[in-house]
Amino acid sequence: MRYLRTMDDATALRADLSGSILVVGAGWIGLEVAAAAREAGAAVTVVESAPLPLGAVLGPELATVFADLHREHGVDLRLATSLASVDHTGGRTTSPPHPSDRTPAGGWATDNGVLVNSRLRASDPHVFAAGDVARQDHPLLGPIRVEHWDTAIHQGRHAARVMLGEDAAYDRQPYFFTDQYDLGMEYVGHTGRGYDEVVVRGDRASRVLTALWVKDSRVVAGMHLNDWDAIDPIRTWVGRPATPQLRDTSIALADVPLVD
């Protein structure tokens, strides 16, 4: 059993990326490990209980891009499939809880993380939580827990400022990125409350595109694939109304007039 939480963990894992590899779960980390293992020459099978990898984040419109990517690189991608059991012959396979996965002993409220208000303060007013462990009442997105180092950095800084007397909500939009094979992606926003449409600009076949998720005529999230000049315009549009010009893919995203 290995954890992948530090650089030392990643270095130790490299030696195991050979032979036949089974990856359980087609989330970001699972797919990144699958890509690394395939590039190292391993035979890789990925098992995912959902019908598409990353479907909860990207929806069926874009999740198929990642399914196709891994299958083209030789991954045996088994979707809508769950493990019945794990048999480790000649040894013993266990999964002890990592210390950060345990419920805190301090007595403050938890529910899929330490519950914090918009200012990152827990039910005990003397306690703040930030990063992976925090489930924040986000002023724009509602209750949300984001497990990414970018959120941990910015929430930690914000919590420190509130401790020092600043009375402001943490309202930064979630951000993350991934690199798999020759595909790079950056994503800003959150579709946890669903979406009504996806505005896609670019070419799915070459995997150079931008996508904007729209809910109630407002952009709630956006991402790019291999379009490295697009992240700043995407970040600017998240939270703004989706205009007819924004939906006109003949106009470059950077040239679409902004509205509030």
Image (spheres, rainbow, N blue to C red):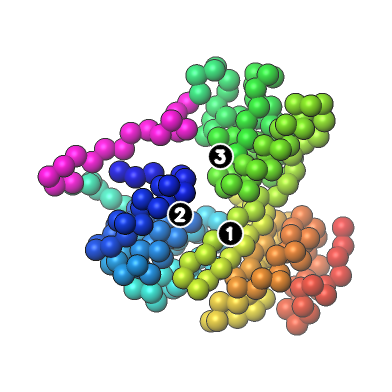
Image vertical order of residue 166 relative to residue 251, above or below:
above
Q: Which residue is mark 2?
A: 29
Q: What residue does disc 3 label?
A: 132
Q: Amino acid at mark 1?
A: Phe
Inspect the image, locate mark 3, and give the three-letter code of the amino acid beneath it. Answer: Asp
Numbered disc 3: secondary structure: helix
Q: Do the numbered discs 2 and 1 sit on residues whose CB atoms are within 8 Å? A: no
Which quadrant: the N terminus?
Answer: top left
CA separation, marks 3 and 2? 14 Å
Q: Earlier in the sequence, mark 2 or mark 1?
A: 2
Question: Given the image, on which type of amino acid does mark 2 rest?
Answer: Ile
Q: Residues within 10 Å of mark 2 (few under 14, many from 20)?
A: few
Left or right, residue 86 beside residue 115:
left
The label on residue 177 is: 1
Q: Is residue 96 visible?
A: yes
Horizontally, residue 45 falls left or right of residue 180, namely: left
CB within 8 Å, label 3 to label 1: no
Q: Taking 231 as reference, is 161 above or below it? A: above
Viewer-side residue, 6 vs 171: 6
User: Would residue 175 be counted in the magenta stretch?
Assistant: no
Which element type, helix, strand or loop, lies under badge 1? strand
Whether pointer 3 and pointer 2 mark residues with C-beta atoms closer than 8 Å, the reply is no
